[in-house]
Image (spheres, helix red, strand yellow):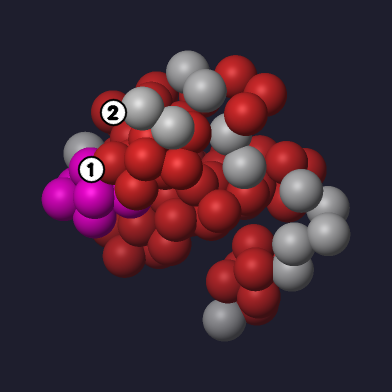
Amino acid sequence: PSYELYGFMADIIARSGELSYAEELIASLSNSADSVAWTSLLGACRLQSDIQRGQRVALLAATSDRQDSAPYSLLAN
């Protein structure tokens, strides 16, 4: 499967409330995990009110692709 498919899977898993499993899946992609996957997880953290994980994921989302402003926009709202 492609890395994009893993990102979609992680998003679905995170939206179902399994944030730990989704985070592990994205982290297993190593350096190939992009800001889109991390930002999806960040949105799920927001929906699930998981502040500690959200802080960790926000840092990962922001540093995975410094050109992508989506993580910053999500944090601002």
Which mark is first along the chain, 1 or 2? Answer: 1
Indicate left or right for 52 with 47 as reference.
right
Where does residue 45 sit, x and y in percent of width and height? Answer: 39, 54
Q: Badge 1, how many Cα within 10 Å: few under 14, some, many 20+?
A: some
**Residues drawn in magenta:** 11-17
Helix, strand or loop at label 2? It is: helix
Indicate left or right for 47 with 3 as reference.
left
Where does residue 56 sit, x and y in percent of width and height? Answer: 59, 39
| Residue occupying the point 43% across, 49% down | 41
Q: Nearer the viewer, residue 61 or 34?
A: 34
- Residue 4's disc number: none
Q: Which residue is mark 2?
A: 21
| Residue occupying the point 73% across, 41% down | 64
Q: Which residue is mark 1?
A: 13
Are the residues tagged 2 and 1 within 8 Å (C-beta)?
yes
Screen quadrant of the N terminus: top left
Can the viewer see residue 57? yes
